[in-house]
Image (spheres, grey):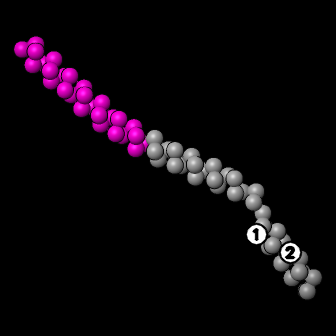
Amino acid sequence: MRLWNSNLLHRLKVLLNSQEGQDLVEYALVVALVAFGATAALQTLGSGLNSAFTTISTTLASSLT
């Protein structure tokens, strides 16, 4: 039983000190941050484009009548 506990404790220490998945988590966080920034930027850009095309449309409509 003591050998089993020692083996389990050793495996837990190895698992806690392992950094194999750390890079994957960091890359996932960077990708999430870039996606969030791109979404916010595209929403702002879309709103500005919508406003510009509405102004152009109104100007063209008023000049044709």
> Where the N terminus falls, by quadrant?
bottom right
Provide the secondary structure element on which disc 1 rests: helix
For the C terminus, the image quarter is: top left
Q: Which mark is residue 10?
A: 2
Query: Was residue 20 drawn as part of the magenta stretch in this picture?
Result: no
Residue behind mark 1: 16
Task: Give the side of residue 5 with respect to residue 39, left or right.
Answer: right
Structural distance between the alpha carbons of marks 2 and 1: 10 Å
Among the 4 quarters of the image, the one containing residue 58:
top left
Give the overall secondary structure of the magenta segment: helix
**Residue 11 sits above or below residue 37 on the image:** below
The residue under the point 10% across, 13% down is: 64
Q: Position of residue 16 (x, y in %)?
A: 76, 69
- Marks 2,1: beta carbons within 8 A: no
Label 2 crowding class (10 Å Cα cut-off): few <14, some 14-19, many 20+? few
Magenta span: 39-65
Give residue 52's position: percent from left, percent from top: 25, 28
Q: Amino acid at mark 1?
A: Leu
Secondary structure under the numbered disc 2 in the rendered image: helix
Residue 39 location, x and y as percent? Answer: 43, 42
Image point (89%, 81%), residue name: 6
Which amino acid type is shown beneath numbered disc 2?
His
Residue 53 in picture, x, y percent from top left = 25, 26
Q: Residue at x 46, y 41 (%)?
A: 38
